[in-house]
Image (cartoon, rainbow, N blue to C red):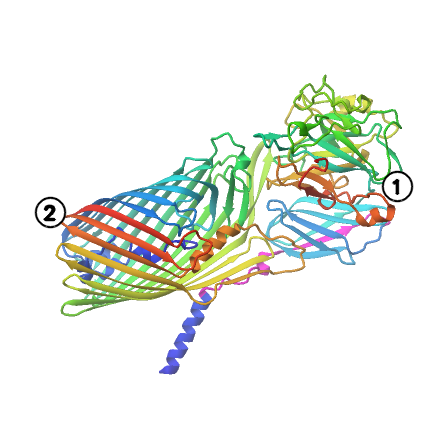
């Protein structure tokens, strides 16, 4: 009798325990095998050690694995829509390959990622400050203090004369990208609103190795006089975007401060937009630096109608810039959205840096390469043509005192 | 079916609520079929006659042993009426209720019953909230000369729940259930079968009217175990302001069956199985789907002596629910954006089980005693971000004792419940795969989770007491109180929560 009671108790315990078992957290049936193969260009040997970055688009969950000697990386991941990037480098080139919106849903996926070579640029974007700050101690927010800092990352003195820059369409990374056709970006970069250029005759604005140049995209004034959490752009070394004819909005483009030299006013090569102030997204811009080849006159180029396509579904025109003119570019995603979409191709920027919050004085900075900086005796910044790796979000603007 | 308990109240409290004071005389002559869903079975055991009860009342709740989703103070005004008419050939029931609740310093869940669904939506600006609950129901059974008796019950509840301070929200809930039943009687053996069909739905609309930036107001979409998305309230991650949907809709279908049997009128057994199927979203958007199931069983023995009735009840309940988050992409073609759903991931699992024994002894003079003990075992598994997981297990003992007495025109009832955690509350947080280079964990509303864990595990007792005086005319006045006292709480602001109420009713 006692045995029967014990057996019954054990059976009931087993039943009750089984009823409460939630199972293993993850089982193979709920995961999908992802195989990523890095395909290098002809003449470049396949090797292991390339970093495969797998980012789930809606949650921004990020995984990182390495390729094996055969150039292949294998892992199991759950259902999702992913952005997959493979990056590697050798002595001469940086290799990147990115696939956006890779759907993995209840089936295994294999990808061959063509590794695109690019060279690290001489002039790179060191900082892009677009997110604005608080007007504290006053009420409200402030975004008329946007700037970009350029940096000479090479061993030689570089000249900024004629260096062009611009932001791409669409302005923001959230929402639809009208340029995507069958999930593919166009073979040009659609620079919207205006093409800007550093003035000069060719040797007027040198930048030595490790030195910086500040470009004020809004007012080149001391913003801290009224808003202490902002920055002072009334500096003699600042390049100021000031064109009261094309951009007459004095809230965003007041007359530059007394320290800013008129010969450092940024030129507007062409304005294709209608805004009365230069438009740079506050939460998710793209920004590129580019130079036309010596055989091309940029002013002629931008005037040709063939180089001014219209935004699909809209009326505004852009300037189509070939990707191989790009010196450097950075893509910014907005942390407040789960639907960010790439606008730059992987040859320009294979990733994206995230601005988590706007109007907090946060800025996006390129990381320093400590090893190279120590070797070469001047600040060398990290440049893998992948802003996910190369940039970080800084709490305050570097120019904030 | 609740995905998780509200640990600031107790199931015993809900059963022995202020609005119910069982007449001990009714307990003495209890029809065991009233324990189940089968109105046809209840009809067979009912004596002919009519009884109705209507009351209006109010109650006031205060005390700091609460979650922020509960008000610092809550005023309720209640009106309720119910009637039973048992004829030779028909058995009819009907009920109507209205409850107006006004709570102060409330924030947190925008749902009318936090924890009912496996997702939750929280806001963080304390303010006053108003909840109106309407309920109506009825049933009928046709007693005929055959051995088969059919019956049906219908119940509907509607809730409007609103907050008028940014971040303001308006929540509408509707709950409908229909239970057709059949009863078979052969000599001393009776059997019954009930089918259960139900649908409940709840829609949350959030709105900001004031001039502050949208970034001033955050919202948290809880996907299970307080893991989820914390964002500006109109961000795309909370789904509160999805273009084309503009609200957070949840719906759930319930279907199942229950079997009943009784032997000689002294033994009653009941077993029920329900399945639920729920989803969050509409108009092509499905953000979550949550299937569930539950099993419950009862075995009751009633022993009648000369002047005492003894009821011994064994009960078992098991619930399981999963939450699956879908993989959705918005595709724009020809200027039209439509959502496409590609599969889903299991992000949360919940199981709970309770088993208990209780006793009630009722004297024909009207006094009764009750006592019982039950064990509750709960297990949650969060898998929001592969390969991270969080496995949570707990076991609690619940003891209760009470009694009632009739002293002239006074009816007095009191009940004491004691809740104690057994063993350690187990948390296992780990990564199923260390080779993926995952350096982050999913966002958790940690301070809320910690407070809720403390409430769940706090040793506490719940005291209910009520006194009713009945006048000659049948009008009665009843005063009741409820007191929860928790021991050794640190994170929660207070140890106590109390409710006092008064109602005026008429029994006819």
Residue B73 drawn at (x, y percent): 36, 44
Question: Is residue A21 one of those drawn in magenta?
Answer: yes
> Which segment is the magenta one?
A19-43
Residue A131 drawn at (x, y percent): 65, 34
The reply, left or right, for residue A220 in relation to residue B479 is right
Would residue A183 be seen by someone viewing this image from the given angle? Answer: no
Say few, some or many: other residues with alpha carbon within 10 Å of mark 2 (under 14 / 14 to 19 / 20 or more).
few
Seen at 54% across and 58% down, the residue is: B390
Label 2 marks a residue whose chain is B
Residue B230 drawn at (x, y percent): 54, 44
The reply, left or right, for residue A114 in relation to residue B129 is right
Say few, some or many: other residues with alpha carbon within 10 Å of mark 1 (under 14 / 14 to 19 / 20 or more).
few
Q: Residue furthest top?
A: A245
Label 1 marks a residue whose chain is A
Q: Which residue is mark 2?
A: B473
Vertical comparison of A181 with A51: above or below: above
The residues tagged by marks 2 and 1 sit, at their Cα atoms, a distance apart of 103 Å
Vertical comparison of B125 with B263: above or below: above
Which residue is nearer to you in this view: A24 or A113?
A: A24
**Same-chain check, marks 2 and 1:** no
Which residue is nearer to you in this view: B439 or A24?
A: B439
Q: Quadrant of residue A280?
A: top right
Residue A376 drawn at (x, y percent): 87, 46
SS assignment at label 1: loop
Would residue A206 be seen by someone viewing this image from the given angle? Answer: yes
Q: Which residue is mark 1?
A: A155
The reply, left or right, for residue B474 in relation to residue A198 is left
Which residue is nearer to you in this view: A163 or A272?
A: A163
Question: Is residue A234 one of those drawn in magenta?
Answer: no
């Amino acid at each position: 009798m006692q045995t029967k009671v014990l057996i019954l108790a054990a059976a009931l315990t087993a039943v009750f325990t089984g009823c409460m078992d939630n199972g293993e957290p993850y089982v193979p049936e709920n995961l999908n095998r992802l195989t990523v193969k890095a395909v290098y260009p002809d003449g470049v040997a396949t090797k292991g050690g390339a970093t495969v970055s797998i980012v789930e688009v809606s949650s921004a969950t990020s995984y990182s694995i390495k390729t094996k000697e055969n150039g292949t990386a294998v892992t199991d991941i759950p259902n999702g829509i992913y952005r997959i990037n493979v990056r590697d480098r050798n002595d001469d080139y940086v290799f990147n390959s990115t696939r956006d919106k890779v759907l993995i849903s209840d089936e295994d996926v294999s990808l061959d990622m063509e590794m695109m070579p690019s060279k690290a640029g001489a002039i790179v974007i060191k900082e892009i400050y677009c997110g604005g700050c608080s007007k504290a101690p006053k009420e409200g927010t402030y975004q008329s203090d946007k700037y970009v800092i350029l940096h000479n990352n090479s061993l030689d003195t570089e000249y900024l004369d004629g260096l062009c820059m611009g932001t791409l369409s669409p302005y923001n990374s959230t929402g639809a990208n009208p340029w995507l056709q069958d999930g593919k970006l166009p073979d040009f970069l659609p620079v919207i609103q205006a093409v800007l250029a550093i003035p000069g005759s060719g040797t007027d604005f040198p930048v030595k190795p490790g030195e910086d140049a500040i470009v004020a995209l809004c007012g080149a004034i001391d913003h801290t006089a009224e808003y202490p959490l902002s920055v002072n752009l009334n500096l003699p070394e600042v390049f100021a975007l000031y064109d009261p004819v094309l951009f007459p909005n004095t809230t965003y483009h007041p007359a530059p401060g007394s320290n800013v030299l008129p010969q450092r006013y940024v030129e507007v090569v062409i304005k294709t937009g209608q805004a009365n102030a230069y438009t740079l997204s506050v939460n998710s811009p793209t920004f590129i630096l580019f130079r036309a080849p010596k055989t091309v006159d940029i002013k002629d180029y931008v005037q040709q109608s063939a180089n001014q396509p219209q935004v699909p579904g809209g009326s505004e025109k852009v300037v189509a810039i070939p990707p191989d003119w790009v010196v450097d570019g950075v893509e910014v995603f907005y942390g407040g959205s789960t639907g960010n979409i790439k606008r730059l191709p992987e040859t320009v920027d294979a990733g994206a840096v995230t601005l988590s919050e706007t109007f907090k004085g946060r800025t996006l900075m390129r990381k320093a390469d400590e090893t190279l900086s120590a070797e070469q005796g001047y600040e060398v910044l990290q440049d893998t043509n992948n802003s996910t790796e190369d940039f970080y979000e800084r709490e305050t603007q570097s120019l904030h005192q | 079916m609740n995905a998780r308990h509200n640990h600031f109240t107790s199931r015993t409290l809900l059963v022995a609520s202020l609005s119910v004071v069982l007449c001990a005389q009714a307990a003495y002559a209890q029809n065991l079929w009233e324990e189940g869903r089968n109105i046809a079975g209840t009809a067979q055991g009912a004596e002919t006659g009519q009884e109705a009860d209507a009351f209006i009342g109010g109650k006031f709740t205060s005390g700091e042993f609460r979650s922020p989703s509960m008000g610092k103070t809550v005023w309720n005004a209640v009106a309720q009426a119910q009637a039973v008419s048992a004829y030779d050939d028909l058995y009819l029931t009907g009920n109507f209720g209205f409850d107006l609740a006004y709570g102060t310093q409330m924030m947190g869940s925008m749902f009318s019953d936090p924890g009912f669904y496996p997702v939750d939506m929280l806001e963080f600006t304390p303010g006053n909230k108003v909840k109106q609950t309407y309920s109506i129901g009825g049933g009928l059974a046709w007693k005929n000369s055959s051995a088969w008796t059919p019956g049906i019950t219908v119940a509907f509840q509607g809730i409007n729940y609103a907050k008028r301070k940014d971040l303001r929200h308006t929540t509408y809930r509707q709950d409908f259930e229909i239970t057709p039943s059949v009863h078979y009687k052969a000599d001393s053996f009776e059997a019954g079968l009930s089918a259960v069909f139900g649908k409940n739905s709840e829609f949350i609309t959030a709105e900001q009217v004031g001039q502050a930036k949208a970034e001033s107001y955050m919202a948290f979409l809880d996907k299970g175990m307080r893991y989820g998305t914390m964002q500006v309230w109109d961000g795309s991650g909370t789904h509160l302001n999805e273009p084309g949907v503009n609200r957070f809709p949840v719906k759930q279908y319930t279907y199942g069956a229950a079997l009943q049997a009784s032997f000689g009128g002294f033994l009653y057994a009941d077993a029920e199985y329900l399945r639920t199927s729920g989803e969050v979203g509409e108009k092509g958007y499905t953000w979550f789907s949550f299937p569930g199931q539950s099993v419950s069983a009862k075995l009751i023995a009633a022993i009648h002596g000369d002047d005492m009735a003894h009821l011994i009840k064994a009960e078992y309940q098991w619930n399981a629910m999963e939450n699956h988050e879908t993989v959705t992409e918005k595709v724009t073609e020809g200027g039209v954006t439509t959502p496409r759903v590609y599969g889903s991931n299991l992000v949360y699992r919940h199981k709970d089980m309770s088993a208990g024994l209780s006793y009630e002894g009722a004297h024909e003079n009207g006094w009764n005693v009750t006592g019982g003990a039950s064990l509750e075992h709960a297990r949650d598994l969060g898998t929001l971000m592969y390969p991270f997981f969080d496995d949570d297990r707990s076991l609690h003992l619940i003891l209760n004792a009470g009694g009632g007495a009739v002293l002239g025109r006074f009816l007095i009832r009191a009940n004491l419940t004691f809740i104690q955690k057994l063993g350690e509350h187990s948390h296992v947080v780990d990564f199923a795969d260390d080779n993926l280079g995952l350096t982050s964990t999913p966002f958790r509303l940690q301070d809320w989770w910690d407070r809720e864990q403390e409430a769940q595990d706090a040793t506490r007792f719940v005291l209910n007491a009520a006194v009713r005086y009945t006048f000659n005319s049948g009008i009665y006045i009843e005063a009741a109180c409820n007191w929860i006292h928790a021991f050794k709480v640190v994170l929660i602001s207070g140890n106590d929560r109390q409710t006092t109420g008064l109602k005026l009713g008429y029994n006819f």
